[in-house]
Image (cartoon, grey):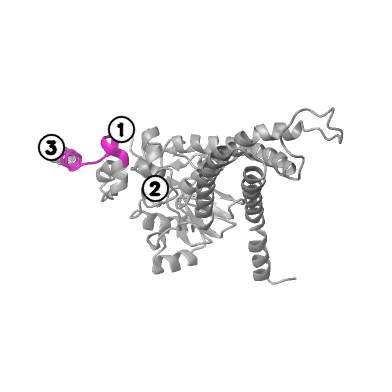
Amino acid sequence: MAPSHVLRCCQRVLAWIPVVFIALVVCWSYYAYVVELCIFTIQNTGEKIVYMVIFHLSFVMFVWSYWKTIFTKPDSPSKEFCLPKADKEQYEREERPESQQEILKRVARDLPLYTRTGTGAVRYCDRCQIIKPDRCHHCSACDMCVLKMDHHCPWVNNCVGFSNYKFFILFLAYSLLYCLFIASTVLQYFIKFWTLCRRKSAENCPKNDLPDTHAKFHVLFLFFVAAMFFISILSLFSYHLWLVGKNRSTIEAFRAPVFRNGPDKNGFSLGFCKNIKQVFGDEKKFWMVPIFTSLGDGSTFPTRLVNIDIEQPAVESQPECVKSIIDGQTPRPLSESQNRLLGNDQHFTEDGLDAANHKIDGELNVSVSMESNS
């Protein structure tokens, strides 16, 4: 039997086959459109120039976004989520899952974690030996934990997650425009070539100004391929636009994230506009450019806990930082990007902090007076 590392190398080589296939199709489409259609088939010079300019603009943006999606390395959790050496040794010595969970819960108190497993346990990856941040999942193909993992895409041979999700959306968008432009501009020549009479006698042939050359085969197949890819990509692109609007990943769409108060499929949704900004950034001028502008660090995400926490029945729907203060824990400050996303909805200002402190002081005074009276 071959060694495991040899098998792993073979798997990595075979994983590039879909990417190579797409690259070959794109290269052929470039040749078929530019050379066979624009240079050899189209007679009108003005039409040639317009088609060539628009085609190359869409081609560059498509290839750029595809390249960024493939070669942008997925982000993994920082060392902050690794167990300290002493806790890690104790965790490995423990045999009872309950004792291991106690260790994880003690370490997780200082981490910005809102989600749990289905049983309410701290999410821990035994393979990577880290506590999983919110929306982080382990990819078996990449053999690593990926921040805000959406899915592993074989067509880009990479994990789609926090670091390249914007690039993936743009890749779908520009590939859709690329196929649409090719199909719409090739259609008229596709019809002419399709109806071109193959008879040698010119008397019975319909009038057609296109020569019966090998270019017609490229044009015919170009239309079929562009139309086929357009239809298949359209459904995938529409689905991911819906996910962006809901602020969900593909994994979260099939399995809702579990918070302390139970599963909540809208737990990370901040509203349509803010959900869009979380992926594409604040500045709209960079939305359609394949450069990284997503907000946040991939490890912490602003969340709107719309349900009442079962562990705190007396506290109504409040930001998590308020609850942590009432529980006696030190609140973790929101990042700048999280503050921008939450805005006035859940931005916990100093005034809110003072109000929470006054509430705690009042509760303490009441409890003290009750004890003194008794």
Question: Relative to 77, is 353 above or below?
Answer: above
Residue placed furthest toward the front: 203
Find out whether the residues at labels 1 and 3 contact each other: C-beta distance under 8 Å: no
Q: Position of residue 368 (x, y in %)?
A: 15, 41
Quick one: 41 or 290, which is closer to the camera? 41
- Numbered disc in front, either 2 or 3: 2
Give how far apart the Cα atoms at labels 2 and 1 are.
Answer: 31 Å
Query: Where does label 2 land, which residue?
Result: 294
**Residue 167 visible in this rendered orientation of the protein:** yes
Query: Where does label 3 land, which residue?
Result: 373
Judged from the image, the secondary structure of the residue bearing numbered disc 1 is loop
- Numbered disc in front, either 1 or 3: 1
Tell me the quarter of the picture where residue 310 sits: top left
Residue 29 part of the magenta-drawn span: no
Question: Relative to 108, is 360 above or below?
Answer: above
**Residue 250 visible in this rendered orientation of the protein:** no
